[in-house]
Amino acid sequence: MSIFGAYISSVLLLLLVFTIFFKLIRIVPEQQAWVVEQLGKFHAILGPGLHLVIPVLQRVSYKQIMKEEVIDVPPQLCITKDNVQVSVDGILYLQVVDPEKASYGIDDYRFATAQLAQTTMRSEIGKIELDRSFSERDQINDAIVRSVDLASDPWGIKVTRYEIRDITPSATVMEAMQQQVRAEREKRAEILSSEGIREARINSSKGDRQQSINLSQGERQRRINEAEGRARATEIIASATAEGIGQVASAINLPQGKSAVAGRVAQQFLAGLGDILRKSDTAVLPADLAQLRAVVDSLRSGDPLRSGTNQGGAS
């Protein structure tokens, strides 16, 4: 029994040694920081690698992850500046930069930062109208990041960014927004239709105006052409008349030209007098027939019709 008891004691002692050895050695993974307390008091922070921790006297109290964490901020009801109720949720990104403060500065920094992000988001949403809340998400995100990062600095936390994931108005507000959008589209359609009608009328009036201008210009050009034609015709007639008068004048200067002219004048006079006597019921004759005879006698000299006149007188 003594040999067996000694063997059992050796095994137990060996197990105790191994247990103490494994309790003494601690391996910290990458991107982690372990907070070690000695007799209940903060002692050191263990970085990645192999470390020795004295059992009973020292213990690992907190294991902080140094990587950036993503926290889902649950939806919450917010009231906008124009008294519209909306549900807003987001995503918060943070990172532990001081493991000691993160361990002893607050009990649960994840829950605390999420709650702080919610309250800050309610405050920022209450500063703007509903319509602006959709277009100013970046400004809201930046304001939340600045506020939460400043408040979480004593906790050893660095808030890197915040993103609003969704802004959902209530059902009644959604219906009102849809009606507003529908009315806006109908208004825009009516405006476009009226602008089209106005443009059509303007184009039509411009067309009528241009047509009137073209017609007036055409009429003006026609009258100018007609006037120029008449002027040209008058010029041609005057030129021909002048040329004829010139030829008559030249013919008068020829031998027996004056006698021919006098005979022609007498012939036209007698023809005209005969027409007057034929068409009139009352015959009007010159008072002095001798004057008529004198005219005829004066025309006899060089008159090609003199023989015919003599024959008429003889008869």
Image (cartoon, helix red, strand yellow):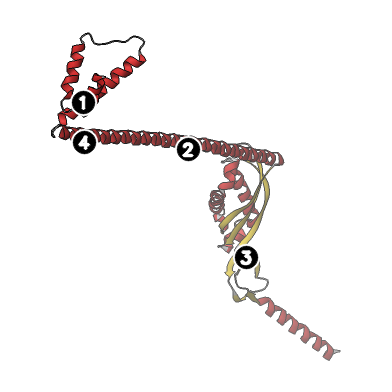
Q: Position of residue 156 (x, y in %)?
A: 56, 59
The quadrant holding residue 91 is: bottom right
The amino acid sitting under disc 4 is: Glu
Of the two numbered discs 2 and 1 in the rendering, the one whose residue sits closer to the viewer: 1
Q: Which residue is mark 4?
A: 243
Name the residue type under label 3: Gln
User: Mark 2, mark 3: which one is toward the viewer?
Assistant: 2
Q: Residues within 10 Å of mark 4 (few under 14, many from 20)?
A: few
Q: Residues within 10 Å of mark 3 (few under 14, many from 20)?
A: some
Quarter residue 292 falls in: top left
- The residue under label 2 is 207
Q: Amino acid at mark 2?
A: Gly
Q: Helix or strand or loop: what does disc 1 sit on?
A: helix
Q: Earlier in the sequence, mark 1 or mark 4?
A: 4
Give the residue number, with chain letter if any, for mark 1: 306
The residue shown at (17%, 20%) is 297
Query: Where is residue 245 shown, x and y percent of the image?
Result: 20, 32
How crowded pointer 1 is (Cα within 10 Å; few <14, some 14-19, many 20+) is rated as: some
Residue 84 visible in the shown view = no
Labels 2 and 1: the sequence-earlier one: 2
Q: Are marks 2 and 1 in contact (CB under 8 Å)?
A: no
115 relative position to 223: left or right: right
Q: Is residue 91 above or below residue 134?
A: below
Front position among marks 3 and 4: 4
Tag of residue 295: none
Depth order, front residue of 262/109: 262
Give 58 or 289, whichever is nearer the viewer.
289
Residue at mark 3 to residue at mark 1: CA–CA distance:
156 Å
The amino acid type found where label 1 is placed reads Arg
Q: Is residue 273 left or right of residue 252?
A: right
- First of labels 2, 3 by sequence position: 3
Q: Which residue is mark 3?
A: 64
